[in-house]
Image (cartoon, helix red, strand yellow):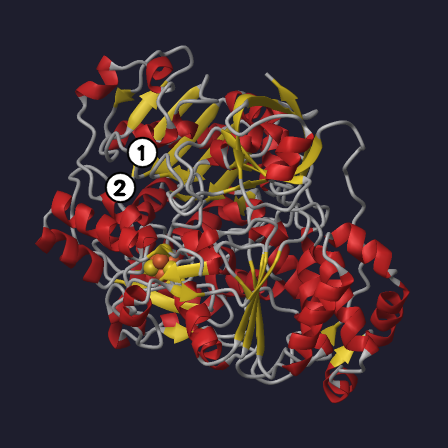
Amino acid sequence: MSKSVGGLSSIKYSLSVANKVGYANFWKSIRSKNTCKTCAYGMGGQSGGMRNEVGTGLEICKKSIQAQLTDIQKGIPVEFYSDNQVEEIKKLKPRELEMLGRLNNPLYKNTGDKHYTVISWEEAYSKIVETLIRTDADDVFFYASGRSSNEAAFVLQLFARLYGTNNVNNCSYYCHQASGVGLNSIIGSGTATLELDDLKQSDLIFVFGANPSSNHPRFLTELMHCRRRGGSVVIVNPMKEPGLVRFAIPSDLRSMIGGGSDIASHYIQPNIGGDIAFIQGMAKCVIGKDAVEHEFINNCTNEYEAHKKHIEGVAWEDIEVSSGVSKETIEDIAELYCKAKNVVFAWSMGITHHLHGVENVESIANLAMLRGMLGKRYAGLLPLRGHSNVQGIGSIGVTPALKEKVFQNLESHLGVKLPETQGMDTMSCIEAANTGDINAAFILGGNLLGANPNRTFAEESLNKIPFKVFMSTTFNESHFNGVDKEVIVLPCIARDEEKQATTQESMFNFVRMSDGGSVRLENARSEVDIICSIAEDIIDKEMVDFGHFKDHSNIRNAIAATIPGLSGLADIDETKREFQIEGRVFHEPLFATPDKKANFKVINLPISNLNGKENTFNLMSVRSEGQFNTIIYEEHDLFRGQSERWIVLMNFLDIKRINMNENDLVDVVNETGVMKAVKIRSFDIKAGNVMCYFPEANVLISKDVDRRSRTPGFKSTVVQLFPV
Ligand code: SF4
């Protein structure tokens, strides 16, 4: 039996945090009626912290508590800024920056200044307003991370458009955009097709390219229950993640005293980028056995014959080479699939972080459709999305192009004319900055520098922007790198500190309301308040009165009237009724496409980028257990048993093949950049493939993007290793 991870370490961590901040404080904080600030699985809201929409509770999640700990910090004292130069602070590790404390004062740094200086809110606002007024709107971009509320996102995108630009985008361009694009092309809707409750009766769950033990911990509870009721869990991941083999679920006594619970019933380790081949191998088996759901396919889908012909024409040899998985193994998994009644397909960025990310998503959907696992209960498609409100930010319109219906609704409801120019996605903004075509950037949350591929290019680009505004709760490397020119940092409060309620949308399309509550900092402000204060000095009140939107319920009314599926926000202040967004969950095989049918796609196997040079490997960049996106809470990676981050994880056969030993140092090199003197660590990863941590490995990730989703290939780059 494999050793389990999780469980006790989560409980110990929680107790250590409680000890640090005081048990009463800790309990109040985690039980408050606020949405979990971390991942988009969704927890909290009006049911209270540690509970979900199907009433499960009380679940301890280390990820959630890590985020709380950061926010509970005291404000950074004003002397810090005069005592420390930007060049000095810049040397701190991301974790050290995060732990400097909370931002509690507006900060200003002019070109050539060595320090940030504390300024008043009035001064900060007037500098921003003056700059935006004299800048051409299309030379400005507005970016939001997925941690902000629906309310802040709505006023941000509305302000940007009324100001005159569609250069509005969000962090999903660097994570799950491919899921939205792929799902839209298949079913006309870009989000999960099922709700949380559906997981409770599925008898087979596939998890592609994800490590929920670190990134969506409570999903593990559902995987465990699937196994306990006799179902199967198939993990498809080049790395054998200990947390997906056996995990001790902190809220489950049986799991805790039994030394953990089995998670994977089958663990498939394909090559990086080998998912399409693996899936097409399975499709070949399903079609070959005639195990397809003919009634569903005939009545509810298009283009099946083209898909079938394509799959029949793909050679097993190509499938085995591309996937790295044997025909026998693929046949076994296909057999399992053919016998299952209710199958869920979950995936994360191991699927989307490729230059063929959209095709990866479409391939999964193709496989689901073959057996009619779309448009019914207890089955369907589930992108495991990252930040707690990243889906909501997109729904609300923080995107370069608004959906046609939203565009029309906004114009008619508000009586305004919105720009129709082509807006830029995130990478286009960074590229435009590099050519000197961006004169100002308005950045709501996140760590834009850390999130970007090709770190050198990104820093150079951000350095060229003459005026940047950050709205942040804590420092990160974006505040100290790429900041040669004028910068303003505005301190904002976290969602559980808001004076008015805010709302968030989970990856299950469930909308929660956060009450806010604890005032921790005297001089930080609400994101909505900040955006509206700036907007009301720029946008004519006759057009839209942003002062009116300082009352969050007025924003919710506007969202309810303009964003399809969110009408439930109109009375949520009175009813406190959280809700499932209409039209997103497909329990019947009637999809959101014009003819209500789902569309099969013909997808070619991706071409390998391995160039045959000596010591060449496919590299994926991944997050650790002590990390959430770009935020690094702990240097060690508990579940993978690693104590540092400047490492490359390799199969021991590959280490031998290149005549090296564990703990030797190598330079990891490609045409984008180099990671110097990286320590080799042996790990159970598919031979021929290696792993480094994100965001350190961003220096190696090219700024090339998937043509359809505009997402970079964070998990598909080729590197060469050279002994130091
Ligand atoms: S699984 Fe995600 S949403 Fe749930 S508690 Fe953990 S971090 Fe929060």
Identify the residue at the far bottom of this view.
295
Instruction: Please name whichever residue, 606 or 393, is drawn nearer the observer in this view of the structure.
Output: 606
Label 1 sits on a secondary structure element that is: helix
The structure residue drawn at horizontal position 37% and vertical position 14%, both measured from the top left corner, is: 87
Q: Dividing the picture into quarters, in which one does residue 423 lie?
A: top right
Q: Quadrant of the N terminus?
A: bottom left
Residue wearing tag 1: 98
Tell me which amino acid carries mark 2: Thr
Instruction: Please name whichever residue, 716 or 544, is drawn nearer the observer in this view of the structure.
Output: 716
Tell me which amino acid carries mark 1: Glu
Instruction: Please name whichever residue, 310 or 116, is drawn nearer the observer in this view of the structure.
Output: 310
The structure residue drawn at horizontal position 43% and vertical position 29%, both measured from the top left corner, is: 478
Badge 2 residue CB within 8 Å of ligand 1? no
Image location of residue 702, percent across then percent down:
66, 32
- Judge from the rendering whether residue 272 lies leftward or rightward of residue 450; answer left or right: right
Neighbourhood count class around disc 1 (C-alpha, 10 Å): few under 14, some 14–19, many 20 upward? many
The structure residue drawn at horizontal position 67% and vertical position 47%, both measured from the top left corner, is: 272
Image location of residue 130, percent across then percent down:
40, 28
- Judge from the rendering whether residue 461 lies leftward or rightward of residue 720; answer left or right: left
Residue wearing tag 2: 70
Q: Dividing the picture into quarters, in which one does residue 610 lie?
A: top right
Image location of residue 30, percent across then percent down:
21, 58
Task: Please say whether residue 702 is visible from this viewpoint.
Answer: no
Label 2 sits on a secondary structure element that is: helix
- 437 versus 442 height, above or below: above
Q: CA distance from mark 2 to mark 1?
A: 7 Å
The structure residue drawn at horizontal position 54% and vertical position 45%, both measured from the top left corner, is: 168
Mark 2 vs mark 1: which is more N-terminal?
2
Task: Please say whether residue 147 is visible from this viewpoint.
Answer: yes
Q: Are marks 2 and 1 in contact (CB under 8 Å)?
A: yes
Ligand 1 visible in quadrant: bottom left
Q: Quadrant of the C terminus?
A: top right
